[in-house]
Image (tube, rainbow, N blue to C red):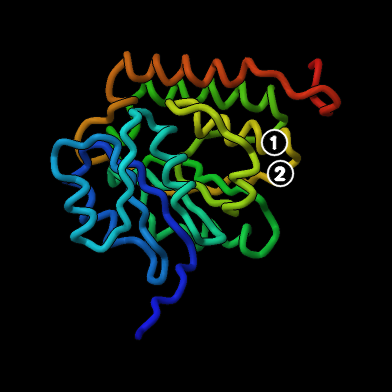
Amino acid sequence: MTLTPPAVADVVLPCLDEAAALPGVLARIPPGWRAVVVDNGSTDGSARIAADLGAHVVREPLRGFGAACHAGLLAATADLVCFCDCDGSLDPALLPALAAPVLAGEADLVLGRRRPTARGAWPPHARLANLELARRVRRRTGLPLRDLGPLRAARRTALLSLGLTDRRSGYPLEMVVRAADAGWRVRETDVPYVPREGRSKVTGTWHGTWQAVHDMSAVLAVRPAAGHPRAGR
C-alpha cells in the first residue's frame, strides 16, 4: 500500500461561488501543500470543481467568512496553516516565501500586505475602510500594520489556542488582535494584489463593506484582559 506523505502545509481557501477562479487558484498551490477548500453554500458547482481538481473539500453550512475560515482550520492537519482568498486576487504560490519566517521560528504570524498591481484591484471604498481599520488596529495592539491582508501563515496549534469566536467578517482581525494580546511576533510583507474573478461578496458593495467594518469594530471594542500591558489604554 502506498502511503501519501503528510502535507508541508494546509492552505485554507474559504469559498462561496468561486467556480471561475478555482482552477487558476488551485493550479498555483505549492507542490506538497494541501488545498483545503471550504464550501460555504456555493450554488455554482464550486465544491465539485475543487474536488475534481484534487482539493480536500469541507462543507460549512453556517454562512460567514469566519465560519468558513475556522472550519478549514479545524479540518487542517499540517503543522503550518495558511489562509488565502479563493477569488484569484492573491497568488498562493507566494505562500512558501510568506511562511518562511514562521517555519524558521522568526515570527508567529505573517500577513501579506496587499499591493494593487492593476486598476480596479481594490475598490476605493474598501481600501479606505481597510486603512481606517489598520489605523485602529495599530492603536489597539501597537503592531505597525498597514493592512489586514487575507494571505497569512501561522502554526495550526497556535492558531487554535487563540480561541477565535467571530464567524463573520471580523475573523481575520480577531486573529491579529488576539495574537497581539498573546505576545505573538507578527510580521507583514508585501504581496501583489490583482483584480479578482467576479464580484466580491464583501468589498464589492457598500453594504458588504459596511458589514465588514461593523463586524471588525465589534472585535476592536473588546479590550485586552486584565494584566495585559495594553489593558486600560
Q: Position of residue 181 (x, y in %)?
A: 72, 33
Query: Does any portion of residue 227 appear in the rendered image?
Result: yes
- Sort mark 2 into few (<14), some (14-19) or many (20+) by Cα contacts within 10 Å: some
Q: Quadrant of the N terminus?
A: bottom left
Local SS, label 1: helix
Is residue 225 rendered to the left or right of residue 193?
Answer: right
In front of the other: 101 or 83 = 83
Residue furthest toward the left? 44
Local SS, label 2: loop
Query: Could you tell me the amino acid type at mark 1?
Result: Ala
Give residue 180's mark.
Answer: 1
Q: Residue at x 33, y 45 (%)?
A: 38
Q: Position of residue 21 (x, y in %)?
A: 22, 47
In front of the other: 142 or 46 = 46
To which residue does mark 2 refer?
A: 184
In front of the other: 109 or 79 = 79
Q: Residue at x 51, y 25 (%)?
A: 131
Residue furthest toward the front? 1
